[in-house]
C-alpha cells in the first residue's frame, strides 16, 4: 500500500524548512504544505500534533517529525519510501 502524502508544516523565511523542502523534492516526495505563519488554524494544528511551535514539522500518516533538519529527515524518510 502506498503511503499517504505527508503534511509539511513550514514558516516563511525558515532556513530549516527550505532545507527540508529541498530534501523532499530531491527525493521526489510529494507533500501537502501548510505555511503556519499565514494560517492560524494550521499553526494551532501543528502545535497540537507536535507539542511545540517550531518548524518544520512533518506529519506522515500520524508519525510526527518535529523541529528537524536534513540529518534527522533522511532517516525518517528512509523507513517510508
Image (cartoon, helix red, strand yellow):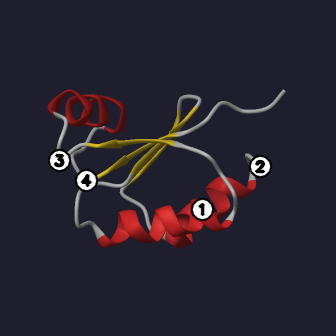
Q: Which SS class for mark 2?
A: loop
Q: Percent from the top left, x then y, of residue 81?
A: 77, 49
Front residue of this view, candidates 17 and 54? 17
Q: Mark 2 or 4, which is nearer the eye?
A: 2
Q: Residues within 10 Å of mark 4 (few under 14, many from 20)?
A: some
Q: Percent from the top left, x then y, of residue 4?
A: 66, 30
Q: Which SS class for mark 3?
A: loop
CB atoms of marks 4 and 1 within 8 Å: no
Q: Mark 4 or 3, which is nearer the eye?
A: 3
Marks 2/1: CA–CA distance? 13 Å
Instruction: Look at the picture and state if 2 lies above or below 22.
Output: above
Q: Residues within 10 Å of mark 2 (few under 14, many from 20)?
A: few
Marks 4/3: CA–CA distance? 11 Å
Residue receiving disc 2: 81
71 relative to 79 in the view: left or right = left
Q: Quadrant of residue 24?
A: bottom right
In the rendered image, the quadrant that contains the N terminus is top right
Front residue of this view, candidates 56 and 34? 34
Instruction: Look at the picture and state if 37 lies above or below 70.
Output: above
Residue 25's disc is 1
Mark 3 and mark 2 lie on one chain; the one further toward the N terminus is 3
8 relative to 67 in the view: left or right = right
Residue receiving disc 3: 37
CB atoms of marks 2 and 1 within 8 Å: no
Marks 4/1: CA–CA distance? 21 Å
Mark 1 and mark 3 lie on one chain; the one further toward the N terminus is 1
CB atoms of marks 4 and 3 within 8 Å: no
Residue 78's disc is none
CB atoms of marks 3 and 2 within 8 Å: no
Residue 54's disc is 4
Marks 2/4: CA–CA distance? 25 Å
Marks 1/3: CA–CA distance? 22 Å
Amino acid at each position: 500500500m502506498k503511503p499517504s502524502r505527508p503534511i509539511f508544516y513550514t514558516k516563511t523565511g525558515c532556513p530549516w524548512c527550505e532545507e527540508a523542502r529541498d530534501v523532499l523534492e530531491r527525493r521526489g516526495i510529494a507533500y501537502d504544505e501548510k505555511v503556519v505563519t499565514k494560517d492560524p488554524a494550521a499553526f494551532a494544528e501543528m502545535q497540537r500534533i507536535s507539542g511545540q511551535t517550531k518548524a518544520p514539522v512533518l506529519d506522515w500518516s500520524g508519525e510526527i517529525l518535529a523541529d528537524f533538519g536534513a540529518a534527522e529527515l533522511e532517516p525518517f524518510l528512509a523507513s517510508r519510501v
